Amino acid sequence: MTFLDEVAAALVRAGRSVEVDPALSTIDVSSAGAGQVLAVVRPVARAVTFYAVHPVLVPAVSVAAVSELVVRATADLVDASLELDLATGALAVRFGVVLGELDLVEDDLAELLDAALDTVETAAAAYSGAIDDVLAGVDPRTASTAVRRAPVEELAVGLDD
């Protein structure tokens, strides 16, 4: 079994729907809730990088502001990072898992990849509105601060109830 096949099997075991592209060594794990999510599998390094792709390309006029948001968001995120492709305007949340020589049993690999996928999807959901706001002209600092404060405000509302 190839490493691509192992990753696909582990993702299915974790309850994910997959569409494997052996030619590109990618696995589409998109879902209605998370939108377009791709796993790029690197067999030599035994690594998987998940990308949750924002549905709107960043126009040239917005690159500077969105770049500032990307830097602020990546500084705030503990695990995932935002990535802006300056040539295409594609924006994604990225998280990588490098196994190298580590050989995990299928259940453990499934749990690890599912956790990584959850990390990407959670970060993408948290920053999707901020990205749209910056594309609409909101200051990147304001948009980033709103994302950072959202969990605290949600907790405060819960405590008030």
Image (cartoon, helix red, strand yellow):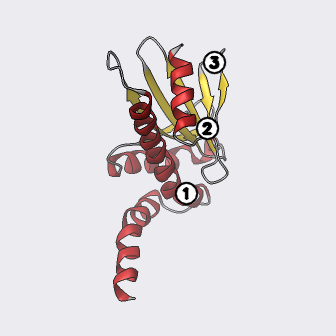
| Rendering coords of residue 27 (x, y %) | 61, 28
Q: In which quarter of the image is residue 4?
A: top right
Are the residues flagged by discs 3 and 1 in contact, CB closer than 8 Å?
Answer: no
Spatial distance from mark 2 to mark 1, Cα to Cα?
Answer: 27 Å
Q: In the image as oriented, which residue stretches furthest toward the bottom?
A: 161
For residue 62, above or below residue 129:
above
Q: What residue type is labelled 2?
A: Val
Q: Nearer the viewer, residue 151 or 133?
A: 151
Q: Disc 1 designates what residue?
A: 134
Who is closer to the viewer here, 64 or 17?
17
Give the quarter of the image for residue 45: top left
Q: Mark 2 points at which residue?
A: 29
- CB atoms of marks 2 and 1 within 8 Å: no
Q: What residue type is labelled 3?
A: Leu
- In the picture, measured across the screen, residue 84 lies left or right of residue 46, that is right
**Residue 42 pos. (x, y %):** 48, 18
Query: Which residue lies under the disc numbered 3?
Result: 24
The numbered dot on residue 103 is none
The Cα atoms of the two marked residues, 3 and 1, are separated by 32 Å
Q: Which of marks 3 and 2 is in front?
A: 2
Residue, x 39% and y 45% (percent of image)? 71
First in sequence: mark 3 vs mark 1: 3
**Mark 1: amino acid:** Val
Q: Which residue lies most toward the top here?
A: 44
